[in-house]
Structures are given as structure tokens and as C-alpha cells.
């Protein structure tokens, strides 16, 4: 987790400014120099995979019944299911030095912090599979959620018209019309929920829908929702969950976010390291069978079996669970199905080390600024029991949703760290004028293909259905088979693939 | 040249008006009745200006040097006016005299300025132009100052720094006048040195203005401040009036030595006197050692562990003679162990078990403190209790914050405690509430330790009775994911303290 490079920056203060400041006591105090750099960069490796080489030939051979490719949440949950059913003869191959995928985490002397997914909505009574996983991790016992890990209050706040309000639905200055439309929107959501077509996992719901053929923004217009507050809120939710604007998101997916959940407790579940808390616990169970730093560069059929090539070992497996993002399959798997329909959103996350809290009201867990192009920040020490917390880490989330994804990916790669540092600090300075006096370090994680994007017409695409339905020696398992990246879908796809692998191994 | 001259007039006028406004504002802040204060301050100020104008006729020679000296005097008196008045008020006597003294002094000096300046300039302009120009800029300056004062100066700089900033402006006008009129000055060097000295004095005061304000505020406590320190966590202030010692943490009253025994006897004895076999006691919060003093009355107690966040607090109450006398030297007693730590994380780390726990945290005024009143906290506490142990929680006022009080009771009940709510009257706090929690059976004690000043067994029995206006009301339990207690508390105390 060493940053690629640490660049010291920050504005220098001239002597004249310093003298003037001392004399007048008016000028801003010296800003802290900010350290940091890019972290977790693996774009190089990704591009090597996509350009097919060069990779070393493996020196060893191994026969393993089940090989899981990718130790993100889907791969870890596939392994969890195999173990749960008493099957331990598998390996997990992960190209990164750390498990977790988009649930990876970091740690410094202050706290652990997330690099991506950072919470799990409290599941309703109907979501059996995810409840089993959470119960297994000690989060649910005798029907009661472990309060230590339910998000502490205050959970969310929104900066609007110059002040913070509780909750993310804009309330300050809301008109009767805004409130009426929010009410009507939730009425639509209740109706949608009652149809039973919007389920988690989504595969338990409907298999096609006219709603997938229009965008969320179009649906809003058709329903005559013109409240700026409601439209901002829906657009924010689409960016937050899918990394896409409401006009680029399938209306089915946009509604699914609201209609598929019925939490039975005020949540969500969250931890300092985000969903890394789950990833590290699962990974620890598979210690010895989890191979990190092991990029798989070739998967080929070999009779009834398949060979899986890393730079050290050639594995022969009865079943390969491909839990990495599905769009990588054509570059690795010899007989991969087409994946052109799979779209992904580019993201940027940054962890900011704060030497002190900015002035003003204490932060909530999730802090959002109305009208910002970014998604706001989450406080990593929020779940701390301490009553005094001076230093902290903020995770800043930014889905690059405006404009074409390819252009945003290029911008992610082409812009240097100082550009992102300034962009992040400028965004935060609008609500925390003294932020530059607080931040001592900004580490930036660029993710070209972060979350699956449920673009218009893509959720129920034929390619997705075919990849998800594969049975045999190659099984797909990533959450992108569902069209959107949420932990429940990752778990469902991982568990389904594990069950099929066991079926293939002999009717278990 | 001309422009600079009239700029001087503009600035002088602005300064003059700002001092007047500062005096008026300060008098309204400190004495109230703003109509009266502003009227009398403006009246005496204008009257003093008249005196100054009249006196100007007696100044005949060395007009420029006189003008510059007057500027420097205005800068000093005006610049330090709000500082002087703050301290004057804090020290109590004769504030009115000081207020009008300062107002009249500045008024006289400001009254001298314009007539002198007009006489200095009279050779350069036609008389009718001179009068027109000088008065135009004079009034323009007044307009500028009257807009700047409420919109920028008071909100951004505050009264102390505003006055100092305009003192600096006066001194700068003095300094540049030594250059503008250098041919009419015999010893410009000396005047420049003086201007420099005044500028430096005002500049230093401006840079240290925060300390000036803090020092003045200390003196705003009603009684004599005998100790004040900013620690890492809070501001500790100790005051004394005759035999009454009072402790303020971040300006919240913690106890008055005149009735703290009521609070602390009621906190400790209903629980601890019922546990004749108790040996280990935990006190969370309570760095003043007063609860510990009550606990040490029991010879059966072998060990008291006191966990308080602020090392300055426990150090102060272990060493200050008056405070040691108050807590009976409890914090230096060999049976007492002091741990300076954040209580919740400490409790999570430790494996120690206790027979009696005193939870004496500040009221749940914010989310950080609210965490210490949640189900997670009480459940964690329960894991550190020996069989038969008791817990007592200071629980704010069931009279002023009724729902908050019963919310704490409800929260403890949800965590498996049988709760025995009781209350006592502490004059400096009002009607105060406690919640005694037991995992097993509890019976109020039949005997109490000797030497108590408040409790006897009859009073004790009565404390468990709640009159109608404090009787139980429904409340949500306080959880980490709702923090309802902070909301109840905020709402209820806001209703009391308008």
C-alpha cells in the first residue's frame, strides 16, 4: 500500500505576506503542505492483460478442482459458499497485492479507511442470503443487529443554501410542491415494491422490463416530477450507486435502488475500513488458498477441464469461477462470450488525513454538498467510541459521471496528482474554508472500471443473461452480471457459481 | 498632494465615527438599554467635539506638529478604547466614569482635528473651496465608517480589534503628515519616531488581541477567578466568593462548594451503602474527586479506579490546596488509582470487574457525549459488573429535562438493568436525577455511613418517590444509531433557557 510517489505541494507564503499577516492579523495563516500521491495503481497491469502480454510462462503445475479468479467480494463469497458446503479444495487467484477488489481498504496511524465500497444497507427480512453471510460474521444474532456496527447518528447531512441540514433529501427552502413530489415519488416506489419485480438479488425479480429502455431522467419527466430538489436527489443517488447521471441510468435500475430494499433497522452497517471489514474477515478464512499478486493471464479449455495460467503456476481445474470484472474475460479466456454490453463507470476515491477537524458543526458519517460534481466525503473515525477525536481520515468519493466514460478514463490517467489534490480541496473549501489548514495528506485512487453501469437498455441485455447462465467448466460470478455493483449481487453471483461448480464436481 | 490631503480628512472622519460607535456598542452590550447608551454616548461625544473645536482657538503656533501629536493621541486613546472599557467593566467599579471619560477624551481630540487641519490648509485653497472640500470628505468618511462598522468590523474583527485597527489608521495619517508637511516642521524626525512607536504599540496589541479578549472575559465571571487554564479538552475555571468555590468546565457550572455535598452524597450512598461487601469501585468522569471522597467513607472499599479524560483536572484536584481540602485529599489516597483516558474506549479495552460503578459524565449536550448514554455503553458496562453489583448514572434533571431523564432510565432497562430512579434537590442545579441500575435485586440501605451532611434514611426513602411533574414519561431508548437523547435534551433545555 505504498503510494507510488509522495509529492509535497501546497502554496508557499512569501515573506511579505507573512509580515503583512502578522501586522494585520487578517490574512490567512500559512497553509499546510499536503503530502500524498496516487495509490493502488494497477492500470499498467490491466493494460498489459488487455494487450495480451508479455507474461512469463509458469514453472509449476498444479491440479486444483476449483479455481476462483479474483478476490473481490464475488470471489470471496464463492469461496465462502464452497466452505459452507464443506468443500475446501480450491484456490483464489488475485492480481492485486491485497484482497477486496472495490472493497479494498487502507490503514494509517489514525484509523483504517475504505478505498471503495464502505457500507452494507441493513437487509430486510426477505434477503436471506446476505443475512446468512452477515450472521456468519457475527453482525446478526437472535434477529438483532450488532449495534456496534450500525452507523452511528448523525448518519447523513447535506450542505444547502449555506448551511448543513440533517439527511440527504433537500429540506431547506423546500416548497409545498417539492414536498408533494417527494411524497408522490415514494408512492411510486411503494407501488413498484409491491409488484415484487424489484428484488435483491435482482435475478429473483423480473427478467425484462420496458423501464430498462428509458433513462431515469426520462421516467421522472414522464411522471411529471419537475421539482429541482427531487431531480437533484435522484441524480445524486444514480451517481452515488451507479456512477452515472440519471439521464445515463436505466430507469429500471434507478427505481430498483429504492424499490428493492425494505430495511428493518436504521442503518446502514458500516466500519472504519468500509466493506474491507468483511473482505479481510473472509480472506483470513482462506489463508493459504488465497494467492495474491497472481494475475491470471490465460484460461483455456483442456478437455473437460480448464487450464489457468499465472506467471508461477499452471492450474488444471474442473471448474473455473471467473469472479473478476466480466469485461476482462475476452482478454484472458480463450473462448470467452461477448461482453460488449458491459459498461463501467470511472471513479476516483481519495483518502484525506486531517490533523484537526475543520471549524463548524461536527461532521456526520456521510457529508454531501448540494450542487457539487463530487459525491461528498465519509468520516472513517465516525464509528469510534472515543468522545474526543482530533485527527481523522475522510474518504472523498467522486464518480466521474459527466460526459463520456472513455474521456473521463483518459482524464483520470492523464491528470497528475496535484490536479486532483487541488480539485478535491477546491470542492471541499466551498463548505470548509479552512480545509487547507487541516489536511496533511491526500492519497488518490483512480479506478478506470469501478462499478458496473446500468446504462439504458443494458440491465436485461442478452450478453449479460448468457454469461450469467453459463454452466460447465467456466462460470461467471461478478456482480456486473446483474448490471450494477452492490454487495448483495456480488454475493449472489459468487454463491450461484460456487453451487454450479459443486454440481459439476459430482452432484453434491 | 490634494488627493492625499482629502484622503486624510476622510480617514480622520472615519476613525472619529468608529470610536463613537464602538463606545456606544460597548455600552449597550455591557449595560443594556441601547437607546439610552447610544443617545448619551453620541451626545457627550458631540459635546466634547465642541469643546475641542472651541479649544482649537488657543493653539496658535506649530500647528502641524500639534496636529500630528493630536492624531497620535487619538490613535492611542481611540485604539485602546475598547480594550480599556472591557477591562474597566470587568474590574467593576466606576464603569460609567471610565466610559464617559474615554468618550469625552476622544471627542475633545477629534474636535481639535478638523479646525486645525483647516487652518493648516487655509493658504492653499480659497476659503469657500476649503470648507466645501473638507466638510464633504468629513461626511463621506462618516458614511464609510457607519457602513463598515456593522457589516464588516463588528462581525469580522470584533470591538477590540476594530478600535485597534482604526488607531493604526490615525497613526498612519500622523506618519504621512510628517512627510506631507515636512517643510513646515522643525523636527520631523522626532515626530516620525513617535509615530513609529505608537504604530508598533497598536500593532502588537492587534496581534495579541485574542489574549486581551480572553483576559477581559475571565473577569466577567461574577466571582474572583482563582484558577483558569485551557487544557487539551476544555477550559477549566475556578472561582471563589467568600467560602463558595465554583468549578466551570468550558463555562458550564460543575459544582458549587456550598451544596456539592448534596449532589455527591445522593450520587454515591443510595447504591454503595447497600453493598456492604463491595471492594472495587469504578468512577467514570468525576475528576474533581468529590464522588471518590464519598466512596472512601467505606472501609470495605479496597480500590477505587477513577477514569477521567483530562489529566489537568485530576492534577488540579490532587494538588490545589483549596480543592484538596474540598475533596478531602481523595485523589492522593493510596486506595485510589487515577487513569486519564477516554472512558468508552477504556471500558472496551479493560477486562476488570467492579462491584459498584459511578457514571458521572457531563450532560448529553452533543453527539460525542451522547454516545456515553447509549445501549452499547450500558451493555459494555454490564459486562464489567460482578454478580450483585450496582451502577449509578447521573441523569440530568427530571424536572427541566423530563423526557431526557426517562430516556436514560428506559435505555438502561433495555440493557437488562432493573432501574431504580431517584432524585435530589441541589440548589445550584435545581432538582437533579439519578438512575440506579441493578442486574440482580436491590434494596435501599437501612444504614448510612456516619458524618453525612444531607442524607439520612428517611430522606433516602423519599428520594425514590417522583412527584407528578417529574413522573415517568414515554421515551425512545437512546441508541448509537439514533442518539435520541441528544435531541430530547437539546429540545428540553432550550425550552428552559430562552
Image: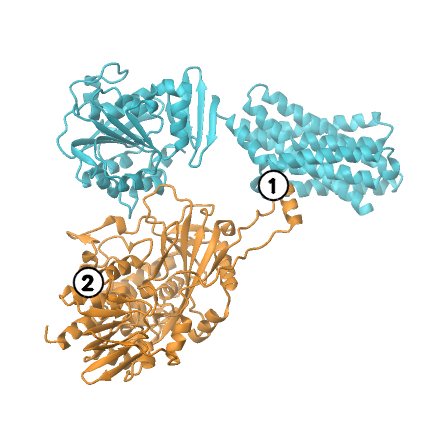
Q: Is residue B406 above or below residue A495?
A: above
Residue highlighted by disc 1: B153
Q: Is residue A308 above or below residue A361?
A: below
Chain identifier, orange in the render: A
Residue B223 appears left or right of B420? right
Quadrant containing the C terminus of chain A is: bottom left
Q: Secondary structure at mark 1?
A: helix
Q: Nearer the viewer, residue A170 or A399?
A: A399
Q: Residue furthest left?
A: A507
Instruction: Report how far apart the C-alphas of labels 1 and 2 lie in the structure.
Output: 60 Å
Marks 1, 2: nearer the viewer:
2
Quadrant containing the N terminus of chain A is: bottom left
Q: Give the color of chain B as drawn.
A: cyan
Residue B98 showing in the rendered view: yes
The percent position of residue B111, horizontal first and vertical second, equals: 75, 30
| Residue at mark 2: chain | A
Amino acid at each position: 500500500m505504498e503510494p507510488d510517489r509522495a509529492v509535497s505541494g501546497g502554496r508557499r507564503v512569501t515573506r511579505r505576506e507573512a509580515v503583512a499577516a502578522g501586522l494585520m492579523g487578517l490574512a490567512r495563516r500559512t497553509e499546510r503542505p499536503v503530502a500524498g500521491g496516487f495509490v493502488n495503481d494497477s492500470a499498467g497491469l490491466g493494460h498489459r492483460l488487455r494487450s495480451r502480454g508479455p507474461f512469463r510462462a509458469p514453472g509449476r503445475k498444479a491440479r486444483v478442482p476449483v479455481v476462483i479468479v479474483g478476490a473481490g467480494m464475488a470471489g470471496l463469497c464463492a469461496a465462502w459458499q464452497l466452505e459452507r458446503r464443506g468443500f475446501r479444495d480450491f484456490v483464489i487467484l488475485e492480481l492485486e497485492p491485497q484482497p477486496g477488489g472495490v472493497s479494498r481498504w487502507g490503514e494509517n496511524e489514525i484509523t483504517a479507511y475504505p478505498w471503495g465500497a464502505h457500507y452494507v444497507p441493513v437487509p430486510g427480512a426477505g434477503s436471506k442470503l446476505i443475512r446468512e453471510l452477515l450472521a456468519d460474521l457475527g453482525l446478526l444474532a437472535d434477529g438483532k443487529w450488532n449495534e456496534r456496527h450500525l452507523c452511528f447518528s448523525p448518519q447523513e447531512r447535506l450542505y444547502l443554501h449555506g448551511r448543513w441540514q440533517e439527511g440527504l433529501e433537500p429540506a431547506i427552502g423546500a416548497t409545498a410542491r417539492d414536498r408533494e413530489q417527494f411524497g408522490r415519488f415514494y408512492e411510486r416506489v411503494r407501488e413498484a415494491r409491491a409488484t415484487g419485480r424489484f428484488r435483491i438479488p435482482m435475478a429473483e425479480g423480473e427478467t425484462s422490463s420496458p423501464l430498462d429502455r428509458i433513462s431515469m431522467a426520462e421516467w421522472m419527466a414522464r411522471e411529471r416530477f419537475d421539482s429541482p430538489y427531487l431531480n437533484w436527489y435522484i441524480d445524486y443517488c444514480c451517481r452515488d450507486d451507479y456512477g452515472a447521471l440519471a439521464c445515463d441510468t436505466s430507469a429500471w435500475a434507478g427505481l430498483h435502488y429504492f424499490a428493492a430494499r425494505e430495511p428493518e433497522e436504521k442503518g446502514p452497517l458500516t466500519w472504519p475500513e468500509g466493506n474491507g471489514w468483511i473482505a479481510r474477515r473472509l480472506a483470513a478464512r482462506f489463508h493459504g488458498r488465497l494467492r495474491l499478486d497472481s494475475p491470471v493471464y490465460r484460461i483455456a479449455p483442456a478437455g473437460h477441464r480448464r487450464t489457468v495460467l499465472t506467471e508461477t503456476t499452471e492450474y488444471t481445474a474442473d471448474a473455473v469461477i471467473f469472479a473478476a470484472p466480466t469485461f476482462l474475460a475476452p482478454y484472458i479466456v480463450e473462448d470467452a462470450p461477448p461482453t460488449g454490453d458491459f459498461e463501467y463507470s470511472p471513479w476516483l476515491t481519495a483518502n484525506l488525513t486531517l490533523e484537526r477537524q475543520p471549524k463548524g458543526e461536527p461532521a456526520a458519517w456521510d457529508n454531501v454538498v448540494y450542487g457539487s460534481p463530487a459525491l461528498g466525503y465519509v468520516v472513517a473515525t465516525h464509528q469510534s467510541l472515543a468522545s474526543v477525536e482530533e485527527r481523522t481520515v475522510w474518504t472523498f468519493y467522486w464518480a466521474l459521471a459527466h460526459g463520456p466514460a472513455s474521456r473521463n478514463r483518459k482524464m483520470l490517467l492523464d491528470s497528475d496528482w496535484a490536479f486532483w489534490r487541488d480539485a478535491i480541496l477546491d470542492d471541499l473549501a466551498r463548505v470548509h474554508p479552512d480545509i487547507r489548514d487541516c489536511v496533511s495528506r491526500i492519497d488518490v485512487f483512480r479506478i478506470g472500471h469501478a462499478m458496473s453501469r446500468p446504462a439504458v437498455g443494458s440491465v436485461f441485455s442478452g450478453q449479460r443473461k448468457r454469461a450469467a447462465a453459463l454452466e460447465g467448466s467456466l462460470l461467471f460470478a461478478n456482480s456486473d452480471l446483474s448490471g450494477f455493483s452492490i454487495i448483495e449481487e456480488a454475493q449472489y453471483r459468487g454463491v450461484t457459481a460456487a453451487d454450479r461448480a459443486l454440481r459439476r464436481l459430482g452432484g453434491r | 498632494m490634494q488627493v492625499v490631503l482629502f484622503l486624510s480628512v476622510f480617514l480622520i472622519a472615519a476613525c472619529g465615527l468608529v470610536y463613537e460607535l464602538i463606545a456606544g456598542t460597548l455600552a449597550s452590550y455591557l449595560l443594556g438599554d441601547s437607546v439610552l447608551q447610544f443617545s448619551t454616548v453620541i451626545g457627550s461625544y458631540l459635546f466634547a467635539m465642541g469643546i475641542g473645536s472651541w479649544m482649537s482657538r488657543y493653539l496658535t503656533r506649530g500647528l502641524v506638529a500639534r496636529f500630528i501629536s493630536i492624531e497620535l493621541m487619538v490613535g492611542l486613546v481611540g485604539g485602546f478604547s475598547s480594550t480599556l472599557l472591557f477591562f474597566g467593566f470587568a474590574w467593576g467599579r466606576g464603569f460609567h466614569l471610565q466610559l464617559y471619560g474615554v468618550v469625552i477624551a476622544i471627542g475633545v481630540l477629534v474636535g481639535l482635528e478638523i479646525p486645525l487641519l483647516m487652518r493648516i490648509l487655509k493658504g492653499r485653497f480659497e476659503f469657500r473651496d476649503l470648507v466645501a472640500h473638507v466638510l464633504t470628505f468629513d461626511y463621506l468618511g462618516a458614511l464609510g465608517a457607519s457602513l463598515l462598522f456593522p457589516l464588516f468590523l463588528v462581525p469580522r474583527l470584533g470591538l477590540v480589534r476594530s478600535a485597534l485597527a482604526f488607531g493604526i489608521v490615525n497613526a498612519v495619517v500622523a506618519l504621512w503628515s510628517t512627510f506631507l508637511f515636512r517643510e513646515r516642521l522643525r523636527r520631523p524626525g522626532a515626530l516620525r519616531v513617535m509615530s513609529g512607536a505608537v504604530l508598533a504599540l497598536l500593532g502588537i496589541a492587534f496581534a495579541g488581541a485574542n489574549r486581551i479578549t480572553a483576559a477581559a472575559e475571565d473577569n466577567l465571571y461574577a466571582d474572583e477567578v482563582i484558577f483558569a487554564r485551557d487544557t487539551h479538552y476544555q477550559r477549566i475555571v475556578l472561582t471563589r466568593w467568600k467560602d463558595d468555590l465554583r468549578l466551570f468546565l468550558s463555562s458550564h457550572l460543575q459544582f458549587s462548594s456550598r451544596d456539592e455535598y448534596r449532589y455527591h452524597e445522593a450520587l454515591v450512598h443510595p447504591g454503595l451503602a447497600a453493598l456492604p461487601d463491595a471492594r472495587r469501585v469504578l468512577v467514570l468522569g468525576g475528576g474533581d474527586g468529590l464522588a471518590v471522597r464519598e466512596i472512601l467513607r467505606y472501609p470495605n472499599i479496597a480500590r477505587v479506579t477513577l477514569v477521567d479524560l483530562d489529566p489537568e483536572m485530576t492534577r488540579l484536584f490532587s494538588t490545589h490546596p483549596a480543592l484538596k481540602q474540598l475533596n478531602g485529599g481523595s485523589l492522593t489516597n493510596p486506595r485510589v488509582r487515577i487513569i486519564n483516558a477516554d472512558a468508552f474506549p477504556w471500558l472496551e479495552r479493560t477486562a476488570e470487574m467492579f462491584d459498584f460503578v459511578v457514571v458521572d459524565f457531563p450532560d448529553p449536550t452533543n453527539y460525542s457525549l451522547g454516545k456515553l448514554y447509549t445501549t452499547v455503553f450500558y451493555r459494555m458496562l454490564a459486562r464489567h459488573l460482578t454478580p450483585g453489583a450496582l451502577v449509578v448514572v447521573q441523569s440530568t434533571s427530571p424536572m427541566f429535562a423530563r423526557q431526557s431523564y426517562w430516556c436514560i432510565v428506559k435505555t438502561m432497562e433495555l440493557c437488562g438493568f432493573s432501574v431504580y430512579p431517584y432524585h435530589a434537590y441541589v440548589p445550584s442545579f435545581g432538582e437533579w436525577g439519578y438512575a440506579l441500575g441493578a442486574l440482580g435485586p436491590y434494596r435501599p440501605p437501612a444504614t448510612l455511613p456516619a458524618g453525612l451532611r444531607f442524607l439520612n434514611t428517611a430522606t433516602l426513602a423519599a428520594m425514590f418517590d417522583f412527584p407528578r411533574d417529574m413522573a415517568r414519561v414515554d421515551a425512545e431508548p437512546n441508541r448509537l444509531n439514533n442518539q435520541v437523547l441528544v435531541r430530547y435534551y437539546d429540545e428540553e433545555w432550550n425550552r428552559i433557557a430562552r
